[in-house]
Image (tube, coloured by chain):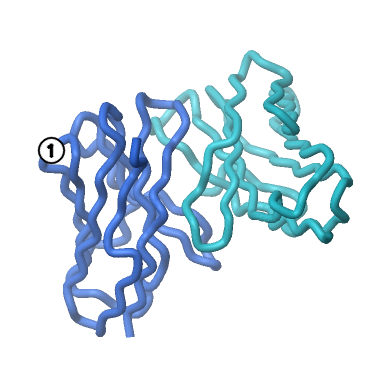
Amino acid sequence: DAGVIQSPRHEVTEMGQEVTLRCKPISGHDYLFWYRQTMMRGLELLIYFNNNVPIDDSGMPEDRFSAKMPNASFSTLKIQPSEPRDSAVYFCASSLAGGLALHFGNGTRLTVT
Amino acid sequence: SQQGEEDPQALSIQEGENATMNCSYKTSINNLQWYRQNSGRGLVHLILIRSNEREKHSGRLRVTLDTSKKSSSLLITASRAADTASYFCATYRIQGAQKLVFGQGTRLTINP
């Protein structure tokens, strides 16, 4: 299995631009999670899906952030407009079922200037 | 909100020594998990211990769980340079949102 695949690995953009991060979960996994990691705040859960349906988006910082999962093999996290404080590493993870081990991608390092 | 708190924040030991990291949490849990993160990479799941288990082993890893004290420990025996990484505990709560909440992690450095 290829594992969780995220793209791009690095993204540098200017403030105000739209950013789209992509994730392909492990086939057969019913749960998909988006986390954000910064030195100051650690790993924060932004949103998670179960069977493509958003279950808890309480961690999404504000309306500038949106996430979709149009099918079982693809999810996007969009930031529009981006701000310098959005700079972080964004991780996607998937799991076979709730409460089980998470499989993480290698993350997207986002830099907003 | 932060559920797991790792201790210490950083640990530096010599190769061959044992490394112990601790995790404390606040609310009742379904299970507790430990992950490793190498620099620039995603987290890798190491071990899961359920609330009705007290100890679990996996290779050189030993995890204990004390639900009465709301704490867990991760022991890495006979450490190797390749064990240098950050280690995170994560808790899966019984009530509330069904999500895994991570602590801030322990940065482990193994000196050759």
Residue toward you, A27 or A64: A27
The answer to which image quadrant residue A89 occupies is: bottom left
Above or below A42: residue A104: above
Please tell me how crowded label 1 is: few (under 14), some (14-19), or many (20+) other residues with Cα within 10 Å: few
Mark 1 = which residue?
A71
Q: Chain of mark 1?
A: A
The x and y percentages for residue A4 are 34, 44
Residue found at x 49% / y 42%: B101
Residue toward you, A72 or A88: A72
* Left or right: residue B3 compared with residue B10: left
In this structure image, what is the colour of chain B? cyan
The answer to which image quadrant residue B51 occupies is: top right
- Per the image, label 1 sits on a secondary structure element best described as strand
Residue found at x 57% / y 33%: B33
Residue found at x 69% / y 57%: B107
In this structure image, what is the colour of chain A? blue
The answer to which image quadrant residue B64 occupies is: top right
Residue type marked 1 = Asn
The x and y percentages for residue A2 are 34, 41
